[in-house]
């Protein structure tokens, strides 16, 4: 009977240990919520950002964020401008890039004024409605005017400075994106690239104040908004400094937010599991000594 009782203790202890491991792998109870935002649109700039489609080359607009610990990003929002005709949203893509020179040819081509602090040549990861790894909903926020735009005037040097393409008027929309496959990223400096394909016309990503102000989440260094099209790839241009120009040139952020959870470092998980194992071993040892003392 004592052996059966001890086996029960062993089974219970191992069961608790397995339950603890499963919980750690699923979502550690000590994970902290993560949230980042650049704030609200400021009405100064709208930039094209779309995947390639029939008759339209790809355009990518990119703004940066920093992670100080491993993070699982579960959802995002970004705000843009739709044409007044309110075309259908056919596809949404979110891409993540490192900061140059990561994932890049170095030295670069020389086709742009600089690649310092730009996004890298190739992306780290992506989620796409076409692949089923992203779902979205939209909140129509009303009529909105943006003072300047960049859509077609994305040129290599020496013709990069166009001043922009002038104002645009349309329907402000906030896209709420859920990653059905979360983005899990180590600590680093990244760029966020949202792309929207419409049934007609073009989506413009709206700028946010730089530096970030409330209700945004300030951080440093906060890099400016970059853009490229398929013809400029793998290089990038700064929307304010290179394309709009001026003395001094304006600089912009893109309007977006990220929500998720920090992920504990592997060493933290190992230490916790080691502690659980030691607790289980000591419990079994005490149970064994108790059984021996009860022997006649």
Image (cartoon, rainbow, N blue to C red):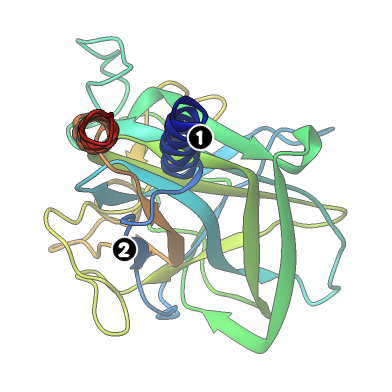
Q: 134 above or below 118?
A: below
The residue at the point 34 percent across, 44 percent down is 263
Residue nearest the observer in this picture, 165 or 57: 57
Q: How far apart are marks 2 and 1 (CA)?
A: 64 Å
Residue position for label 1? 8
* Secondary structure category for the residue under label 2: loop
Residue nearest the observer in this picture, 79 or 12: 12
- Which of the 4 image quarters holds residue 246? bottom left
Callout 2: few (<14), some (14-19), or many (20+) C-alpha neighbours within 10 Å? many
Residue nearest the observer in this picture, 140 or 46: 140
Q: Position of residue 228 (x, y in %)?
A: 46, 36
Callout 1: few (<14), some (14-19), or many (20+) C-alpha neighbours within 10 Å? few
Q: Position of residue 295 (x, y in %)?
A: 28, 29
Q: In this view, does 50 lie to the left or right of 241?
A: right
Say the numbered circle drawn on residue 203.
none
Q: 40 above or below 207?
A: below
Q: Where is residue 199 in the image (x, y as percent from the top left)?
A: 87, 53
Quadrant assignment for the C terminus: top left
- First along the sequence among labels 2 and 1: 1
The residue at the point 23 percent across, 38 percent down is 279
């Amino acid at each position: 009977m004592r052996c059966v009782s001890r086996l029960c203790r062993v089974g219970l202890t191992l069961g608790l240990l397995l339950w603890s491991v499963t919980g750690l792998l699923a979502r550690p109870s000590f994970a902290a919520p993560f949230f980042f935002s650049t704030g609200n649109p400021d009405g100064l700039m709208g930039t094209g950002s779309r995947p390639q489609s029939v008759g339209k080359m790809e355009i990518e607009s990119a703004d940066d964020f920093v992670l100080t610990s491993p993070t699982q990003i579960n959802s995002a929002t970004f705000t843009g401008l739709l044409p007044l005709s309110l075309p259908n949203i056919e596809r949404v893509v979110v891409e993540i890039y490192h900061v140059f020179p990561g994932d890049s040819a170095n030295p670069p081509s020389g086709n742009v004024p600089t690649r310092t602090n730009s996004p890298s040549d190739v992306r780290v990861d992506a989620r796409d409605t076409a692949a089923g790894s992203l779902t979205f909903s939209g909140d129509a926020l009303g009529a909105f005017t943006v003072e300047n735009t960049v859509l077609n005037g994305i040129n290599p040097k020496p013709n990069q400075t166009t001043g922009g393409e002038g104002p645009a008027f349309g329907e402000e929309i906030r896209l709420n994106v859920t990653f059905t496959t979360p983005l899990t990223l180590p600590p680093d400096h990244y760029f966020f690239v949202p792309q929207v394909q419409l049934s007609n016309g073009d989506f413009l990503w709206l700028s946010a104040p730089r530096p970030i102000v409330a209700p945004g989440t300030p951080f440093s260094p906060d890099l400016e908004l970059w853009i490229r099209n398929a013809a400029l790839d793998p290089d990038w241009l700064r929307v304010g400094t290179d394309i709009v120009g001026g003395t001094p040139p304006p600089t912009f952020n893109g309007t977006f937010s990220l929500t998720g959870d920090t992920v504990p470092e592997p060493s933290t998980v190992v230490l916790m599991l080691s502690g659980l194992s030691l607790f289980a071993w000591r419990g079994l040892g005490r149970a064994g000594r108790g059984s021996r003392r009860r022997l006649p």
